[in-house]
């Protein structure tokens, strides 16, 4: 998985992966309830409408998905890194409308009225930032603050100002450069109030800015230096902002006590690797997506384990991608010699996921279907120039949650 977004009541969630396919989940039952099997470039960020089941998808293709089995619609917005979607009441119309904001790959921010498909504003970064290659971005919950991370290690925060009356000045933005971290920025997140920023970088360091003034460093020591097994991939603030949570390529999800920077407990260790973490404003306190397309959903209670260890948080997990026939139809399209070039990489990701599901016993591929998958994989490898697809990684099940040692910060709780 590459992106997750939960509804404000915590009842539903939409996930996206490297193949561009989208799944809508019922978080009560932890079950997929709808999917779009259309191949597309990877989803980088997702925002949900509060008035319908629809979702906006940021990526090389910016899309609007109705949230059911229908196909997503391509929007006339360039490649995007992040998206925010919220309801507002227009002063001249008096009726609610949906305001969408996008962080473009070049660093600009576009504001749109989705109902009218109308672009409201384009806010360009200052010249001093125009040469950056941006790798990730995010919006605060209300959409009035954005944060961007660059491959150079630069982190920038943008405060957006929307005109509340037609007579007021146009949209404006204040760009603030927070400086450089030690490696390329892999993920960036704003706390629920939009007053603090956390990033993880390629050097395996988690950095936070408190009240957006000055940096404080939270160091994570790699367990196997040089092999990248503890390279950090994702970061999130806890629901109340008192904890910071990080995900790693090793499959670990760690908690960090925000007031001191001390590490708390390892919440779980899943099969490699943790790709995305979501903390919805209500409902389940933590949702984790991994590289195998599995969704792990934490319960709201924290009873003791059978062995009596305190602080354990039970979770349920499920997988999507259960329709091989629908995926094969998309793969055939992508493998054609004149097929869309942008679909080659997503199709290769879909094949890898399909074979993993078969390996784990999720479904059976007939010999004829498996032979076709192998043929399509070879055609796609030829189109991409990447050679034959590599072998599947070995299975590595990690350990369960660990209790917090004496002298460590308080145990992470869902409401934190």
Image: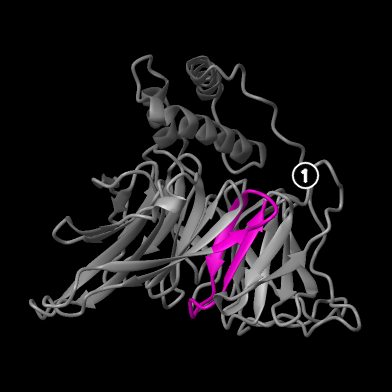
The residue beneath circle 1 is: 228
- Which colour style is shown? one colour
Q: Is residue 35 visible from the viewing direction of this image? A: no
Magenta span of residues: 178-201
x then y, percent, for residue 360: 66, 42
x then y, percent, for residue 99: 25, 67
Relative vertical location of residue 175 with respect to residue 141 in this rendering, above or below: above
Residue at 61% x, 62% y: name it.
199
x then y, percent, for residue 4: 49, 59
Residue 263 is a magenta residue: no
Q: Residue furthest front?
A: 128
Relative vertical location of residue 343 with respect to residue 280 in this rendering, above or below: above
Residue at 89% x, 78% y: name it.
405
The quadrant of the picture occupied by the C terminus is: bottom right
Q: Nearer the viewer, residue 338 or 186?
A: 186
Residue at 50% x, 44% y: name it.
133
């Amino acid at each position: 998985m590459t992106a997750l977004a939960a509804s404000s009541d915590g009842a539903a969630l939409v996930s996206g992966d490297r193949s561009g396919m989208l799944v809508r989940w019922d978080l009560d039952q932890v079950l997929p309830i709808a999917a779009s099997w259309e191949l597309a470039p990877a989803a980088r960020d997702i925002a949900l409408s509060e008035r319908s089941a629809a979702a906006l998808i940021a990526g090389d293709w910016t899309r609007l998905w109705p949230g059911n089995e229908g196909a997503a619609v391509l929007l006339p917005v360039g490649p995007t890194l992040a998206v925010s979607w919220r309801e507002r009441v227009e002063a001249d119309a008096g009726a609610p409308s949906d305001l969408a904001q996008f962080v473009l790959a070049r660093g600009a921010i576009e504001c749109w009225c989705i109902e009218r498909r109308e672009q409201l504003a384009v806010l360009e970064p200052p010249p001093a930032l125009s040469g950056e290659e941006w790798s990730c971005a995010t919006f605060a919950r209300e959409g009035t603050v954005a944060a961007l991370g660059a491959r150079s290690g630069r982190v920038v925060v943008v405060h957006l100002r929307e005109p509340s009356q037609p007579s007021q000045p146009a949209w404006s933005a204040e760009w603030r450069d927070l400086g450089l971290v030690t490696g390329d920025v892999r993920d960036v997140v704003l706390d629920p109030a939009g007053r603090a920023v956390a990033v993880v970088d390629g050097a395996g360091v988690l950095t936070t800015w408190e009240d957006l003034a000055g940096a404080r460093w939270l160091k994570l020591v790699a367990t196997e230096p040089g092999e990248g097994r503890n390279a950090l991939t994702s970061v999130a603030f806890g629901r109340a902002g008192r904890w910071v949570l990080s995900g790693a390529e090793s499959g670990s999800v760690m908690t960090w006590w925000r007031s001191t920077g001390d590490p708390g407990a390892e919440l779980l260790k899943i099969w490699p690797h943790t790709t995305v973490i979501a903390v919805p404003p209500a409902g389940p306190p933590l949702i984790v997506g991994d590289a195998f397309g599995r969704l792990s959903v934490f319960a709201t209670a924290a009873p003791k384990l059978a062995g009596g260890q305190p602080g354990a948080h039970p979770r349920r997990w499920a997988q999507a991608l259960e329709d091989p026939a629908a995926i094969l139809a998309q793969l055939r399209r992508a493998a054609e010699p004149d097929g869309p070039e942008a679909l080659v990489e997503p199709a290769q990701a879909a094949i890898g996921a399909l074979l993993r599901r078969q390996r784990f016993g999720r479904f059976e591929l007939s010999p004829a279907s498996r032979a076709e998958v192998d043929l399509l994989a070879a055609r796609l490898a030829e189109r991409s120039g990447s050679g034959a697809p590599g072998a599947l990684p070995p299975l590595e099940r990690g350990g369960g949650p660990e209790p917090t040692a004496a002298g460590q910060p308080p145990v992470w709780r869902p409401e934190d």
